[in-house]
Amino acid sequence: MQHMVKDLKLKEIGRKKMNWAMDRMKVLGSIYRDLEKEKPFDGVNISMSLHLEAKTAVLAMYLQKLGAAVSITSSNPITCQDDVAAALTDDVSHVYAWRGETESEYNANHMKLLENGPNILVDDGADLTAMVASSGNGSGIYGVCEETTTGVRRLKALQDSANLKFPAIAVNDARGKYLYDNRFGSGQSVVDGIVRSTNIMLGGKSAVVAGFGWVGRGVAERLRGMGAVVTVVESDPFRALEAYFDGFTVTSMDRASQYGDVFITCTGDKRVISERHFSIMKDGAFLANAGHFDVEVDVAWLKANAVSSNDVRPNVTEFMLKNGKRLYLLAEGRLVNLGAADGHPIEIMDLSFSLQLLSALYLLKNHGMLENRVYPVPSEVDEGVVKKFLEINGVELEKLSSEQLKYIKSW
């Protein structure tokens, strides 16, 4: 009886989170209402591997309401919110996820999605797609919609090696998504994760951001806005130039490691911060990762070589090194914005998940007419989502006259 009461309480908390998000996801809600009578996904099996929190649950609910049989798991072992997962079991066909999955449990949950015979995949990081590629059998799958930079890279690698078994929509690469999701969404949510997990003051701290792509730009901007003194580490000369002209100090990780207080990796690459950097860092430095996998900070080295490790706060692990210095790893070196906070703001995911729903619809309507390669989000979908958001929020666009349109196209 006590266990039942606990489960009901968990569901109640999750439901409140979902209702809060749904009420603020106005673009996605508008698209749902436009399609509600049509039920375009009727009879379609959709398997979703996304960070399972409230906004994701809203997308899954809408897809199910539009006729789909939705199966879902979390795309990272520590980003599932158990209360939301519990509540979502009442709204979709299958939920296979909980926070703190082992690697074998994580893989098994993904395999369950594939065993349900999906027609459309909605992926975040391309683990689900890679599993299909490894099996060598993509029959019955119309295509995949991919959410992240890391995932799109993997899709293109699968395409280049002739291992992509179905068409793919690079939702991450949409023109709008770079701006609102990667830059503004990551910028706010990464800082949120750092502040929530540590409760430290960012003003006056030396913050080091590795990578100045769209995510790195957003993180650096928000850290500066919080009063941090920001250094950017970048290997690309053009991005380094941009960071320099934007007023950031730009240097190597070897040099920045000597003075940084807080380090955030935003590259998608491996061992961006490694043994040689750990050894020269300040006692008490914080290490956070905004990228998809736990390889940007060399977590494996820390676990294997630290004298001791201790969870000193939720989502904060202290590693004592042989030189006597303490380093603090946030959210296990995984996505700090989702591991230690709620991920991107609701309005950001309203836009991104609107793209996901419409991209899934595009795959459905064009089934059998697309090649097994990576496609961009159709421009009319990308622009339509942004315009709808602006309209809902009372933003009026300037309209060019026919004379003006003619002039800018003339030579």
Image: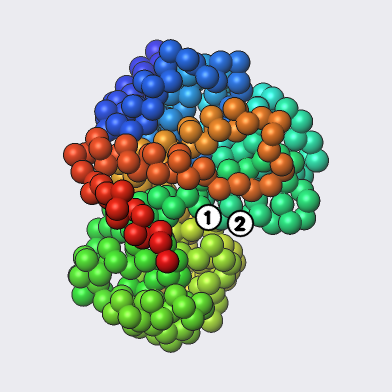
In space, the residues marked 1 and 2 are separated at their CA atoms by: 6 Å
Q: What mark, if any, has residue 153 been given in the picture?
A: 2
Q: Position of residue 158 (x, y in %)?
A: 71, 52
Q: Please, is residue 150 above or below residue 1 in the view?
A: below
Q: Position of residue 118 (x, y in %)?
A: 65, 27
Q: Amino acid at mark 1?
A: Thr
The scheme the figure's colours follow is rainbow
Q: Position of residue 169 (x, y in %)?
A: 58, 43
**The furthest residue to the right:** 136
Residue at point 80% right, 40% down? 136
Assess whether mark 2 and mark 1 are in contact (beta carbons under 8 angstroms).
yes
Query: Relative to the observer, which residue lies in front, 142 or 385?
Result: 385
Q: What mark, if any, has residue 408 been given in the picture?
A: none
Residue at point 30% right, 26% down? 19
Q: Please, is residue 309 above or below residue 233 in the view?
A: above
Residue ID for mark 1: 149
Apparent side of residue 181 relative to residue 73 in the rendered image (left or right): left
Residue at point 52% right, 19% down? 40
Locate residue 137: give its quadrant.
Answer: top right
Image quadrant occupied by the C terminus: bottom left
Q: Amino acid at mark 2?
A: Arg
Determine the secondary structure under disc 2.
helix
Determine the secondary structure under disc 1.
helix
Query: Relative to the observer, which residue lies in front, 113 or 350?
Result: 350
Q: Residues within 10 Å of mark 1 (few under 14, many from 20)?
A: many
